[in-house]
Image: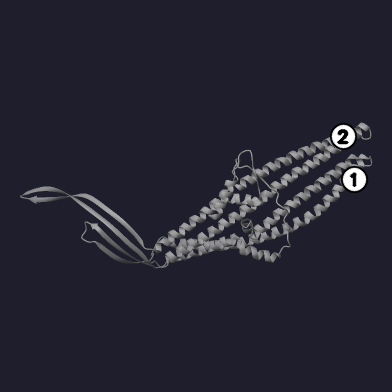
Amino acid sequence: MRGLLTVGMLMAAFCLSAAEQRVLTLEECVRIAWGEQPQVAVAERNWRVAMERVKSVRANLFPQFSAGYQFRRFLSTRSIFQLGLTRVVTEPTEFKESSLSLSQLLFDTFQTPLQIRQAKAQANAASFTYERTKADIALQVAQQFFTVLQARAQVRLQERVLERARRLLEAAEAGFKAGTVARLDVLRAQVQVRTAEVDLLAAQNQERVAMLTLRNLMGVGDDFLFDIAEPSEEPVAELPSLTQLLAQAFRQRPEVQEAEWQRKSAEAARQLARLAMMPTLTINGSYNRYPTSSRNIDKEWSVNLVVSYPIFDGGRLRAELTTAELQREQAALTLQRTLNDIRLQVEQAYLNLQNARERLAAAQEAVKEASETARLTEEAYRAGAASLLDVLNAQVALAQAETQELQARYDLRRALFALRHAIGEITRYFAAR
């Protein structure tokens, strides 16, 4: 509840006029998504429903007190033989009764405790489903947040590429006027400019689409105006061993607890199904008092003992027991599959993070070398010592190196949050900031 209040205050603070917008951090985007994304709301409602189910089942253990009132009016008809004649007499009769009733279940062969255990297991599973949903949304928002920033950086990169292509076109045109280069060089430079313009338009559209996707993940509408801020670079510390990360994931991932509680719920259902095939003993007591009644009694009490045993039901109970046993096996297999999936996710995130870090270091060196090569080649072209094709090739190589460096930089950021999600840390990471 406190988290929802915090999100509500955050949303209220961001309700700005159409002429202004707030710049949001990654942490603020995630908190807004937790409060506005329907997936999170559905998971939270399912958890609350499961908790109410526990209360409903547990109520059977407590005394049941009720009050009632009855009123009935009816006509009774009887025949009277008198003085040799038969006549029909109709008499009205009224029945009035107010009652107070108190009843208590004493014993039902452990059925209610098993039902409570099953309901609690389902509620615990629902709580971890809620936590899993929050973690998944946090990862999706974080990944898309960096996708938007990468798209913006790509736009800036394409603007630089276009600027270099225009500068080369100016040099080619100047050389053509001076008679030092052929018109073919001018045409090639013009093609390079047009290609860069097309690439820039595509990058700008990718930025807009990425921002729309981020809005959708956050669960906000078009009337909520905001921009996002580039977070500072996080230093990637030396990672623990893969074995340590796997142990941490198995201990912290909500999916593991969710599957474990589902298995316990299935086990309770199996015990209930087996109990239904055995003799059942039920004992309950009741006490009724009638402050006003047309009867001749004003109070009564009773203790009921019922023993039942299913003799023939067409195989229904046996089928229900078999179903419950199969569902328990399914729950155990689901738990094992969950552990296998988590292992794969941790290993993939671990390798992706290492790979992105190595690619970034290599790409940064490649950008330095390609930038220097492009500068020297352009100077040589202006001096007539290099051809236009040499310059174009150098610029293409520089653009490719810059694109790879940009991709590796944001892959590293996404991989870091993917690893946090894989080991079950991402929710605590954002909740603590």
- For the point 66% across and 58% down, the residue is 420
Residues tagged 1 and 2 counted as in contact (Cβ below 8 A): no
User: On the image, numbered disc 2 is attached to which residue?
Assistant: 186
Whether residue 280 is situated above or below residue 85 in the rendered picture? below
**Residue 247 at what x, y percent from top left?**
65, 66
SS assignment at label 2: helix
| Residue 276, visible in the rendered structure | no
Q: Callout 2 environment at 10 Å: few (<14), some (14 to 19), or many (20+)?
A: many
| Residue 237, visible in the rendered structure | yes
**Residue 361 at what x, y percent from top left?**
79, 55
**Residue 412 at what x, y percent from top left?**
73, 54
The coloring applied to the image is one colour
- For the point 57% across and 52% down, the residue is 6
SS assignment at label 1: helix
Whether residue 281 is situated above or below residue 67 in the rendered picture? below
Q: Amino acid at mark 1?
A: Leu
- For the point 51% across and 54% down, the residue is 46
- For the point 79% across and 38% down, the residue is 195
> Which sits earlier in the primary sequence, circle 1 or circle 2?
2
Report the residue that reaches farthest toward the top.
177
User: On the image, numbered disc 1 is attached to which residue?
Assistant: 376
Does residue 323 appear left or right of residue 426 in this picture? Answer: left
Whether residue 73 is situated above or below residue 105 in the rendered picture? above
Q: Amino acid at mark 2?
A: Val
